Image (cartoon, rainbow, N blue to C red):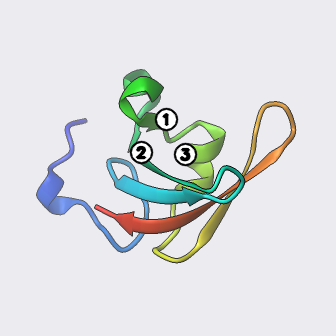
Amino acid sequence: VILDESELVTDAVSLGSFVKVYDEEFEEELEYTIVGSTEADLDLGKISDESPVGKALLGKKVGEVAEAVLPGGDTAKFKVLSIG
C-alpha cells in the first residue's frame, strides 16, 4: 500500500509518521519514520511498526511517553517531541 503523505494524521503516531523523540536513558533526540516491516532500515531511521519501539510509539501524541520492552528485557522510554 502506498501512503499519500497529504492524508497522514499528525496528531498521533501512525504508520508513515516521521517522529522526533527524546530517549530518556541516553538523553538524546532521535528521529524515526514508522514503516512496515519490509521497509525497516535502522541505518536510515526507518523502524517497523512491529518492532518493540515502533509498537510503543503507535498512537502516542506529542508530549506522551512511550515505553518499549526491548529484547533483552530492559525498558526504554521515549518522549514524543513532534510528529510529521
For this rendering, which residue is in front, 6 or 24? Answer: 24
| Three-letter amino acid code at the position of disc 2 | Tyr
Q: In the picture shown, does residue 35 fall above or below 26? A: above
Q: Considering only order in the chain, which callout, 2 or 1, is on the residue closer to the N terminus?
A: 2
Neighbour tally class for label 1: few under 14, some 14-19, many 20 plus, Cα within 10 Å: many
- Cα separation between marks 3 and 2: 9 Å
| Three-letter amino acid code at the position of disc 3 | Gly
Neighbour tally class for label 3: few under 14, some 14-19, many 20 plus, Cα within 10 Å: many
Residue underneath mark 2:
32
Residue underneath mark 3:
54
Place residue 70 in its image quadrant.
Answer: top right
Query: Residues at badges 1 and 2 in contact (C-beta under 8 Å)?
Result: no
The residue at the point 40 percent across, 35 percent down is: 45
Query: Residues at badges 3 and 2 in contact (C-beta under 8 Å)?
Result: yes
Residue underneath mark 1:
48
Residue 27 appears at what percent x and percent y?
Answer: 62, 56
| Three-letter amino acid code at the position of disc 1 | Ser
Query: Residues at badges 1 and 3 in contact (C-beta under 8 Å)?
Result: yes
Label 2 secondary element = strand
The residue at the point 78 percent across, 31 percent down is: 71
Q: Considering only order in the chain, which callout, 3 or 1, is on the residue closer to the N terminus?
A: 1
Q: Quadrant of the N terminus?
A: top left
Residue 30 appears at what percent x and percent y?
Answer: 47, 49
- Cα separation between marks 1 and 3: 6 Å
Taking the image as shown, residue 45 lies to the left or right of residue 8, namely: right
Nearer mark to the viewer, of 3 and 2: 2
Q: In the picture shown, does residue 74 fall above or below 58? A: above
Nearer mark to the viewer, of 1 and 2: 2
Residue 59 appears at what percent x and percent y?
Answer: 51, 65
